[in-house]
Image (tube, grey):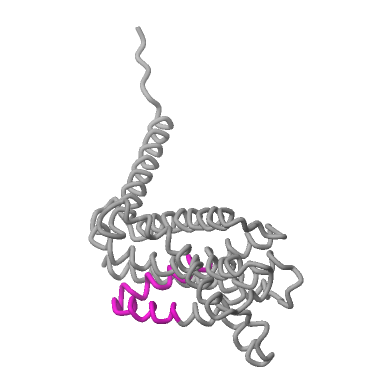
Amino acid sequence: MQIEVPSLGSRSIFSKAERIDSYLRVLNALMLRDMRTRFAGSYWGYLVQVLWPVAHMFIIACAMTFRHVPPPFGDSTMVFAATGAIPALAFQYISREIMKGILTNKPLTYYPQVRTLDVMFSRVLVEIVSSFLGVMLIFSVLMAFGLNPIPIDPVTAICGYLCAIALGIGAGTINVAIVQVFPGWMLGYIGIGILLYMASGVLFMPSELPEQIYDYMKWNPVLQLVEWVRLGYDPSLPITIDYVYLFLWVFCTLTLGLTLERTIGRRGGA
């Protein structure tokens, strides 16, 4: 009777599979912990995160209706509000929550199985899922009101939305590096986020402003992301998107953030 002894190659396969399984377990635990600790230490509190974009849309629509301001394009104030709130909030929440995830889960990084990148990646996954759920909920609400939330050019609108997520991840990695050195940056970035939100054309059409002011405002990449999504709803809008400029923002922020995190992480480990 012969007994088969696992070869060295099979052992390496088993060990690699075990490492992958262990990594997935760590990510799963971090994601569940993030969802549970958002609001009131309950999974039900996670729904608040998903409902925020809907609340923003209603607030903007109600304010414009109360002031008797017609939508700058299309026939629906709610659709106009949604086209601005969705990309702006996708960027804002992801870039901010990645940073908050590091502060919340910092003690977990003292375990050898958990790295800072694991915490960042788990928070990114949670925020992307939350953002998608928020979009689906907004679409459901708009359809319930008898409105059509489907863009004329879906590819353009989806690409603008995905670029907002990518820029949020890039800015979030930079925030992670900064907040590990200056924890007070958390409050500072909240203030910056509010200014960016107000200056990104969520509440108005920047292209209707004087040309000199509009040219300066377009240096804000979030404004161009909002316009990119709105261009998918009305291709006739007098809007020109600098795609190279936005892609450079995404690439540079992600590269700089990962480089800073790696440098700071090594110093912290030392």
Q: Dividing the picture into quarters, in which one does residue 261 lie?
A: bottom left
Q: Quadrant of the N terminus?
A: top left
Which residue extends farthest right?
A: 236
Q: Quadrant of the C terminus?
A: bottom left
Residue 113, placed above or below residue 225: above
Left or right: 258 as drawn, with respect to 215: left
Residue at horizontal 71 percent and vertical 76 percent from the top:
239
Q: Main secondary structure of the magenta part?
A: helix
Q: Dividing the picture into quarters, in which one does residue 109 lie?
A: bottom left
Residue 142 location (% of width, % of height): 57, 58
Which residue extends farthest top?
A: 1
The span shown in magenta is 167-194
Relative depth, front residue between 134 and 165:
134
Answer whether residue 258 is visible to the viewer in this image.
no
Residue at horizontal 41 percent and vertical 72 percent from the top:
260
Answer whether residue 161 is visible to the viewer in this image.
yes
* Number of marks present in the image shown: 0
Residue 20 location (% of width, % of height): 39, 42
Relative depth, front residue between 88 and 57:
57
Residue 20, placed above or below residue 5: below
Residue 255, placed above or below residue 38: below
Is residue 176 covered in magenta? yes
Residue 24 location (% of width, % of height): 38, 44
Relative depth, front residue between 148 and 30:
148
Residue 69 location (% of width, % of height): 60, 79
Q: Dividing the picture into quarters, in which one does residue 10 lie?
A: top left
